[in-house]
């Protein structure tokens, strides 16, 4: 977000603050406390700011919890990401996802 600001963009932040902090976003950056699966909020925010690209970093990241409660992680990281993608498609915005370096199953075939 700070790099985008430095590059002259006006980022808009959406976070449900489930693990994040409001103070992490500068006061002069538009911030919405909303869930990425909240269709109505997403449509409203995308339209209000004329958003043309979405960078997706929202998710649950605690590895031990993902093992003890995998369905919670599937829901937040997979099902809700699909809802965000759907909103992007519905409103005509592009979406990019954060990536970790993971061994590729495709490369082992
Ligand atoms: N931290 C790293 O070094 C790193 C490296 C590569 C990829 N990633 C990936 O980037 C993503 C974010 O990682 P992070 O370290 O910034 O995690 P983080 O926990 O610091 O940030 C995730 C944010 O997403 C928010 N959030 C969670 N679920 C949400 C939802 N349903 N709707 C709206 N907001 C939601 C949380 O409140 C939190 O602020 C993850 O997918 C992670 O795998 C992180």
Image (cartoon, rainbow, N blue to C red):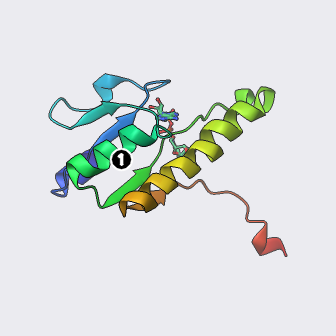
Tell me: residue 41, above or below residue 78.
above
Which image quarter: residue 62? top right
Which structural element holds mark 1? helix
Q: Is residue 85 left or right of residue 45?
A: right
Residue 73 point in image, percent of width and height: 68, 36
Q: Which residue is mark 1?
A: 43
Q: Does the beta carbon at disc 1 come under 8 Å from ligand 1?
A: no
Image coordinates for residue 2, horizontal then vertical, percent: 25, 45
Q: Position of residue 96 (x, y in %)?
A: 46, 60
Horizontal relation, residue 81 to residue 11: left or right: right
Q: Nearer the viewer, residue 95 or 3?
A: 95
Which image quarter is the N terminus in?
A: top left
Of the 4 image quadrants, the one containing the C terminus is: bottom right
Residue at horizontal 55 percent and vertical 38 percent from the top: 59
- Relative to 80, residue 108 above or below: below
Q: Looking at the image, which residue is at 27% across and 55% down?
A: 51
């Amino acid at each position: 977000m700070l790099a985008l600001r430095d590059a002259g963009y006006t980022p808009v932040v959406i976070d449900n603050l489930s693990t994040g902090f409001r103070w992490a976003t500068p006061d002069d950056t538009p911030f919405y406390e909303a869930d990425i699966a909240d269709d109505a909020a997403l449509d409203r925010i995308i339209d209000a700011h004329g958003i043309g690209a979405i960078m997706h970093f929202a998710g649950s990241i605690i590895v031990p919890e993902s093992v003890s409660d995998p369905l919670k992680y599937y829901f937040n990281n997979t099902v809700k990401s699909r809802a965000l993608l759907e909103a992007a498609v519905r409103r005509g915005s592009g979406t990019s996802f954060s990536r970790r370096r993971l061994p590729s199953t495709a490369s082992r075939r």
